[in-house]
Image: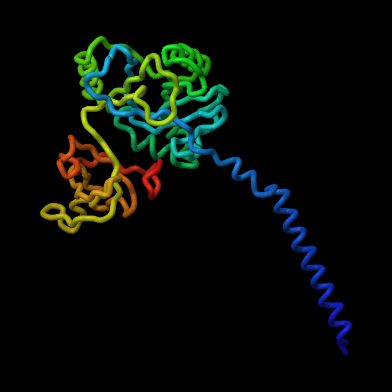
Amino acid sequence: MTTPAHTGLSLHRRFQTLLRGLGCAILALLLVQPLGTAAAEDRPQAPALMLAQVWHNGLAVQDYWVSEKYDGVRGYWDGHRLISRGGQLIAAPPWFTAGWPATPLDGELWAGRGAFAHAQSTTRQAQAGDAAWKRMRFMVFDLPAVPGSFDQRLPRLQAVVAAIGRDWVQAVPQWRVASEAELQRQLAKVVAAGGEGLVLHKADAPYRTGRSGDLLKLKPYDDAEGQVVGYKPGKGQWQGQTGALLLQTREGLRFALGAGLTAELRRQPPPLGSWVTYRYQGLHDSGLPRFARFLRLREDMDSNGQP
């Protein structure tokens, strides 16, 4: 027969056993992840990078170094790991970054002209594989932690890259031009060869984070990002497929984008909420883009349009 005393003792022992079990579980968690801080420490923050503004006529081109604008994925080497502009770890294989210095490097992970999709896909995957990474290059264009002007940083950058001694790590070629006419000829030459455009880096400028007039981009067209908020049905040969994407700009304006969509994208359009890049030639009085044309899906952007 069970007495109240026995019942109380049994409950007490069960309670003690439960506490011991909880204590062991908590201790195990602390041993594996002390105070939950290690995982947070492993997650990098978005690097403070120098971002380009748009070139406009009338600037003194003689004050700038000129280089090709590579159509790839921005990569920041913080001294021991590769980080995207948005603060995501880039899972490059160990051989790709072997021998890289403790000095931070700013550059573009590039797969060649016209191969943005490969660069984007490779840098977003946790295990893209050696074959994919062997098509990649890290084009280094600045040393964020080195003081002084770009004139002073450039030879240091070239020396750092030379010391790495890997074919897939290259210092971005830089040159000077004497006039706007020569700059436009260089732009036309790069674009004709399949390049995206040019970058101009002010020779006497330090590395300044954020948007800076010391770093400029020059392309034969404007481009911007828009979020997919709907679809327009296709007509004629596109009957039953997507005729156009309904986009919303960062300013909150909406317009239909059909030009530039491939047959595959019309069959399987980018999902709602995703972001795409489109090119255009100036703006209407309403603020909407003129002659807008689809360029690419931005898989590197989150739902808020942040990389």
In percent of width and height, residue 284 lies at: 15, 41
The reply to whether residue 135 is in sight is no
In percent of width and height, residue 127 lies at: 49, 41
Quick one: 14 or 144, which is closer to the camera? 144
Compared to residue 281, the image places residue 264 above or below, namely: below
Quick one: 40 or 239, which is closer to the camera? 40
Quarter the N terminus occupies: bottom right
In percent of width and height, residue 192 lies at: 21, 23
Q: Residue at x 27, y 15 (%)?
A: 60
Total marks in image = 0
Q: How is the image coloured?
A: rainbow
The reply to whether residue 303 is in sight is yes
Q: Residue at x 44, y 30 (%)?
A: 49
Q: Residue at x 51, y 16 (%)?
A: 160
Which quadrant would residue 139 be assigned to in this image? Answer: top left
Quick one: 155 or 73, which is closer to the camera? 155
Which quadrant would residue 118 be assigned to in this image? Answer: top left
In percent of width and height, residue 79 lies at: 56, 27
Compared to residue 74, the image places residue 164 above or below, namely: above
Residue lying at the far bottom of the rendered structure = 1
Q: Residue at x 24, y 16 (%)?
A: 183
Quarter the C terminus occupies: top left
